[in-house]
Amino acid sequence: MKGLHPRSGLSQFDALQQARLVRRGEVSAAELVAAAIRHAEQLNPGLNAIITPLSDQALEQARTILPGDSRPFAGVPFLLKDLLASYAGARLTEGSRFLGEFVSRHDSELVSRLRRAGLVVIGKTNTPEFGILGTTEPLRFGPTRNPWNRTRSPGGSSGGSAAAVAAGIVPMAHANDGGGSIRIPASCCGVFGLKPTRARNPLGPDHGDLFSGGVAEHAVTTSVRDSAALLDVAAGAAAGDPYQVPQPRRPYLEEAGRDPGRLRIAVSVTSPTRTPVHATCAEATWEAARLCEELGHIVEQAEPGLDPDSFSESFDTVWSAGIASCVEEWCLRLGRRPASGELEPTTWAVWHKGTSVSAPRYLLAVTALQRAARQMAAFLGEFDVWLTPTVSLPPPPLGYFDPAPDHPLRGYERDAAFCPFTPVANATGLPAMSVPLCWSQDGLPVGVHFTGRYADEATLFRLAGQLEQARPWHQRRPPLQDDELCSAQDEGDHARRE
């Protein structure tokens, strides 16, 4: 990317580089944002990644950003996932017909911080209804298609964001994660996705925590350093948050460029819930393990030994009750119950499954997951990180997670088998990341997953930066028809006409 003239292909630059171009006056923020909007207009009809364009507001904001703006992401185009992220004046649907055209009246705390860092929101991205599944195929908006193969799922629930980043529409996009929803689509779309430690990023003002601490906010990104720099501007407890996480010793952006030293890495391809793992995903993990050994790390085959039945049952109890609470919260906010057809069959089934969970049963499930957290802490007392597949299958075909007419939970059950590795970090509060190191023989991305110690995103960023340097993924781009941006000069003319 070094030496590329900004007017010949801005999608080749990561977010920090784009902000640098704006700061130096080599391209204006309006040109940069207009280029992203035009790229979205070209590609989104085939991808369906963006479901709420916010072009007019974005261009208006971009025109106020001048050369010399020192904010880390001044003028950089950005997308918000249409789940949890409240953006004042924009609709919030969470992928559901039930929410209709609900419009947010305020910015969530995270969105406020991202905007203060200079990011320009150009739209909101597709998500499955209430983020339930590891794919992005809501009935309300239709499926988001994987840029690498449009018959395949982009993963979920941040599939719209991951598809947009993989396609080069924006260099990074908001994502959140309650069971793998940052890391699953990062794996399926060939981008970088880190889930921070529990409570690292705020969920307010609407929530203190969600799913007993299982939900985390962050992003999917083109580069490791973008993820690190974004966490620097977003992290930190807000007033009234229920708990806080220890603060880092130094900025994460610095960590992304530091030598990780010689790490002790545990590797396993056995699912914690003992569900099958596809040979392609297993081989990608062993390939990553060999790369880590070549880089000087100590790699040993080991696993934490979580009880598969206890973990599966307890996580499902908390998850289904959490989804039920989301539906009930919207019932309160909207002042009515969902009518027939306003919730998808899977959502309706999970809602009623969750409402059947008693308070004692819920608290016992939380206690069981807390035992798993202590077990993971002991395991990571022996190892610095744990390497596994991100998901158990390469990106599956669209429709794979559909419910059956006589079995509305069929896709929900398939989802649990598809992503058995990622929920461990949600249940235990640990940071974890999917790194796009491998592709299948038929050209589909296959991420590998690293789980770190509590509050130790620093080690993950160091390792990710080293892996990115050893095996860069930026040159791998999906085979899109309109893959290159129009010239920034043309886009600047478009912005001025607007």
Image: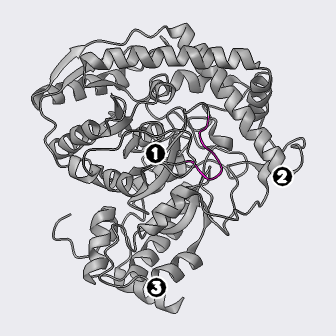
Say whether disc 2 or disc 1 marks the residue closer to the N-terminus.
1
Say whether disc 3 or disc 1 marks the residue closer to the N-terminus.
3
Q: For the residue marked with disc 2, what is the amino acid?
A: Leu
> Can you give x and y, in whole percent of width and height, for residue 102 in the image?
76, 60
> Can you give x and y, in whole percent of width and height, for residue 32 in the image?
39, 76
Q: Mark 2 points at which residue?
A: 334
- Residue situated in front as seen by the camera: 34 or 102: 102
Q: Distance between the residues labelled 3 and 2?
A: 36 Å
Q: In which quarter of the image is residue 187?
A: top left
Q: Mark 3 points at which residue?
A: 63
**Is 472 a magenta residue?**
no
Q: Nearer the viewer, mark 3 or mark 1?
A: 3
State the quadrant of the C terminus: bottom right
Magenta stretch in the rendered image: 203-210
Q: Residues within 10 Å of mark 3 (few under 14, many from 20)?
A: some
> How did the renderer colour the structure?
one colour
- Answer with left or right where residue 183 lies relative to residue 72: right
**Quick one: SS at disc 1?**
loop
Q: For the residue marked with disc 3, what is the amino acid?
A: Arg
**Quick one: SS at disc 3?**
loop
> Can you give x and y, in whole percent of width and height, for residue 426 in the image?
49, 30
